Amino acid sequence: MIFQSVAEYYEILSDNASRLQREQKLLMRLLAEAPGTRVADVACGTGLHADFFASLGAEVNGFDISPEMVDVARGTRKTSNVTFQVGDMRTLSGGLWDLILCIGNSLSLLGSLDEIRETFVHVHSCLSPGGLFAIQILNTQSEQASKPRHRVEHKALDDGSIVAVKNLIPHEGGTLLSLTFFHLQGDRMSSVSETARLLHLTLEQISQIAEQSGLKVTNVYGGLDGSPYDPSTSGDLVVVMRGDS
């Protein structure tokens, strides 16, 4: 299970305020186009987006397979109309929800196309009539994604500092992901690491699985900023699907 040991450090890799400023226009549009305000955020991580939708007045459930991530979300997100619980996107149950999200490249953490299909089927069964399902993954068709990528972030703490290192290495039709966090306290240093293999998913594959699962693709973007999707240059692939009306 990924993101157990790194949960408490995970947000160091993200500037939450600037991220939400960049993404909020599209996120608000998704909520406005949904048939109601019941929202499920699957693979919610530390709850950033679940809390954002709750701040807009939606009734939100955040699910993550990592109990450690859920604990962090419960401890940091205090909006009254959002709840967090351990849950697997492949066996989602409950609802009916008007908007279901799976963002942060979480879908690519699944092990096969069969597991993607299983997830879509469960999502479809949990959508209200005309409900929306939105996913965001890395665009692995881009020129940039064909090369190794490395990112380093620093954050000062009261008791020292954190250095976060993220590596993405293309390998045999997938991408190897590693996250390492170094906690520096004077002369002392500790570290935690996680690794995973990311599936390479194309728009064509997602569209086919969506159709097989009773979902219809309605919009495609190159990021949660709402930019147009270009297979060769977009950093992300965002796909919005609608269930049966």
Image (spheres, grey):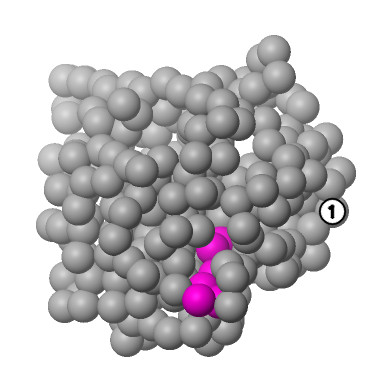
For the stretch drawn in magenta, the main secondary structure is: strand
Q: Quadrant of the C terminus?
A: bottom right
Report crowding for label 1: few under 14, some 14 to 19, many 20 or more residues within 10 A (C-alpha): some
Which residue in the structure is indicated by mark 1? 230
Residue located at (29% from left, 40% from top): 65
Residue found at the far top of this picture: 172
Residue 23 visible within the image: no
Query: What residue type is disc 1 on?
Result: Asp
Residue 238 image offset from top left, x and y in percent: 65, 57
Q: Nearer the viewer, residue 107 or 72?
A: 107
Q: Quadrant of the N terminus?
A: top left
Left or right, 118 with respect to 206, comes to left
**Secondary structure at numbered mark 1:** loop
Residue 81 image offset from top left, x and y in percent: 21, 78
Q: Nearer the viewer, residue 243 or 79?
A: 243
Tell me which corner region of the image, top left, top right, bottom left or bottom right, holds residue 90.
Answer: top left
Does the magenta segment cover residue 132?
yes
Q: Is residue 75 above or below residue 242?
A: above
Left or right, 33 with respect to 236, comes to left
Does the magenta segment cover residue 41?
no
Segment tinted magenta in the rendering: 129-134
Residue 112 image offset from top left, x and y in percent: 56, 26
Residue located at (73% from left, 46% from top): 208
Residue located at (71% from left, 19% from top): 173
Tell me which corner region of the image, top left, top right, bottom left or bottom right, holds residue 56.
Answer: bottom left
Q: Nearer the viewer, residue 1 or 36?
A: 36
Q: Is residue 119 above or below residue 165?
A: below
Residue 225 image offset from top left, x and y in percent: 64, 68
Residue located at (69% from left, 13% from top): 172
